[in-house]
Image: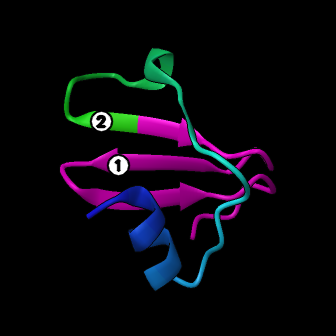
């Protein structure tokens, strides 16, 4: 399931476009993205974790 779809199902709105940050990916199992507001989206084995710009884990 795409990052945007999972984020919306969690009630979180992605701001603008997502930018991949492969330098923060410790292995091929991870995909890391940032949106325009500085929120971080970590996709690991298809499961999304969102770290909001203020540090909250969504």
Comes first in the chain, label 2 or label 1: 2
- Residue at the far front in the pictured view: 17
Label 2, label 1: how far apart the Cα atoms are? 6 Å
Q: Is 57 a magenta residue? A: yes
**Residue 6 on the magenta segment:** no
In the structure shown, which secondary structural element does the residue marked by tag 1 occupy? strand
Q: Taking 27 as reference, is 42 above or below it?
A: below
**Callout 2–callout 1 Cβ contact below 8 Å:** yes
Position of residue 14 in the picture relative to residue 49 (left or right):
right
Q: Position of residue 33 (x, y in %)?
A: 52, 39
Which residue is at a point 58% across and 43% down the rendered structure image?
A: 18
Residue positioned 41% across, 71% down in the render: 5
**Residue 53, image x, y percentages:** 77, 52
Residue 17 picture location, percent across and down:
64, 46
Segment tinted magenta in the rendering: 32-58
Camera-side residue: 17 or 31?
17
Of residues 19 and 22, which is closer to you in this image?
A: 19
- Write down the residue under mark 1: 43
- Asked if residue 52 lies left or right of residue 48, the reply is right
Say if 18 sits above or below 48 in the image.
above
Q: Residue 32 sits in which quadrant?
A: top left
Q: Which residue is mark 2?
A: 30
Quadrant (top left, top right, bottom left, bottom right) of the C terminus: bottom right
Query: In the figure, residue 34 lies in which quadrant?
Result: top right
Q: Is residue 24 left or right of residue 51?
A: left
Which sits in the foreground, 16 or 43? 16
Give the class, few, some or many, for how many residues have Cα within 10 Å of label 2's Cα (few <14, many ≥20). Answer: some
Residue 20 in the image: state x and y as whole percent.
50, 30
The local crowd at label 1, few if under 14, some if 14 to 19, many if 20 or more residues have their Cα within 10 Å, is some
């Amino acid at each position: 399931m795409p990052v945007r779809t999972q984020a919306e199902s969690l009630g979180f709105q992605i701001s603008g476009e997502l930018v991949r940050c492969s330098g923060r990916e410790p292995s091929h199992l991870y995909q890391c993205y940032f949106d325009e507001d500085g929120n971080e989206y970590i996709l690991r084995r298809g499961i999304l974790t969102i770290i909001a710009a203020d540090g909250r884990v969504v």
